[in-house]
Amino acid sequence: MIGIFNKFRIGLLPIYVMLAIFTASVSLVSRSKDDELEIQNDFPFEVKVMPVPKDVANGQTVEMRFTIQRNGNYSNTQYFIRYFQFDGQGTLRYYDEAPYVPNDLYPLPTEEFRLYYTSASAVSQSFEVWISDSFGNEKQLSFEFNSSD
């Protein structure tokens, strides 16, 4: 008689295993939208700029040092730069590359970089630099130089 019960228990084992797998599957599939795992890849950032001179002479070049500081780290984030000069005249360039065209968007290959502004004016100059990332976050930086001629 005991042998019959042991066979019956062993016969139910596959059913118990299948029931456990089914229960686990249903609970994983039936998660609500609110319970979904959120993967964050959009991290706001700050831009730090070393101090720059207040005065610039016509033809003088000023070095500007920038650092992008992330609030998180997502390896595929790309950064871009554009600028617009609204007072005076001058050129802005990345290291020794060709000067930027105002309002055109350029990729930034690093998060620490230097820009060089060369004055082409004997009056005060003002311009804005916009740094954005591939997720639409954007920072605006304003620069003003007095003429030293």
Image: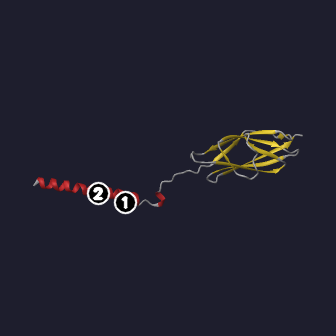
Label 2: state its secondary structure.
helix
Q: Position of residue 61 (x, y in %)?
A: 80, 39
Q: Position of residue 11 (x, y in %)?
A: 20, 56
The residue positioned 51% from the left and 53% from the top of the image is: 38
Q: Quadrant of the C terminus?
A: top right
Tell me if residue 22 comes above or below residue 118 in the rendering. below
The residue positioned 12% from the left and 55% from the top of the image is: 4
Query: In the current view of this chain or complex, which residue is farthest to the right?
Result: 149
Give the Cα separation between the discs numbered 1 and 2: 12 Å
Identity of the amino acid at label 1? Val
Residue wearing tag 2: 18
Residue 63 seen from this side: yes
Q: Position of residue 126 (x, y in %)?
A: 81, 48
Q: Quadrant of the N terminus?
A: bottom left
Residue 1 badge: none
Q: Nearer the viewer, residue 32 or 13?
A: 13
Does residue 145 appear left or right of residue 7 in this picture? right
Q: Nearer the viewer, residue 115 or 38?
A: 115
